[in-house]
């Protein structure tokens, strides 16, 4: 599983990182987080299919729950 922020330093965003990682591991599950840059993965108010987002701020309990939910999915 990859957990990444949408906004990253150095010109690469989290979506681009996830796309590159999935070229190497097609079944990689990805959880994005962001405090503001939803436009990189949200289109017309909806997330792209298969995209998971945990908005900041979040608690460790929320993070743990979201990770558990994603890893327990049977869509590989």
Image (cartoon, rainbow, N blue to C red):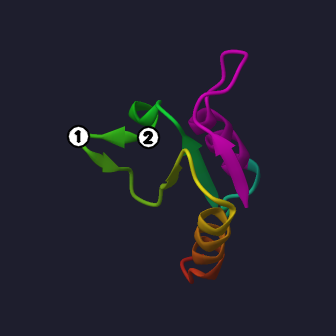
Quarter in which the N terminus is drawn: bottom right
Q: In this view, does 51 lie to the left or right of 16?
A: left
Residue extent of the magenta highlight: 1-23
Residue shown at the point (60%, 55%) measured from the top left = 31
Locate residue 8 relative to residue 54 in the image: left or right: right
Image quadrant where residue 59 sits: bottom right
Can residue 29 be found in the magenta stretch? no
Identify the disc placed on residue 20: none
The residue identified by callout 1 is: 44
Q: Which disc, if any, is residue 41? A: 2
Q: Position of residue 68 (x, y in %)?
A: 65, 76
Name the residue at the left extreme. 44
Q: In which quarter of the image is the C terminus?
A: bottom right
Q: In this view, does 22 lie above or below 14?
A: below
On screen, 52 above or below 34? below
Label 1's element?
Answer: loop
Up-down relation of residue 26 to residue 13 (above or below): below
**In the structure shown, which secondary structural element does the residue marked by tag 2 occupy?**
loop
Name the residue located 57 percent from the left edge and 76 percent from the top edge.
Answer: 69
Closer-to-camera residue (34/23): 34
């Amino acid at each position: 599983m990859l957990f990444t922020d949408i906004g990253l330093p150095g010109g690469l965003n989290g979506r681009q990182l996830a796309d590159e990682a999935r070229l190497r591991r097609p079944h990689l599950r990805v959880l994005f987080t962001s405090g503001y840059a939803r436009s990189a993965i949200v289109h017309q108010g909806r997330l792209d299919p298969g995209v998971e987002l945990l908005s900041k701020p979040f608690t460790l309990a929320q993070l743990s729950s979201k990770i558990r939910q994603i890893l327990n999915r049977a869509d590989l």
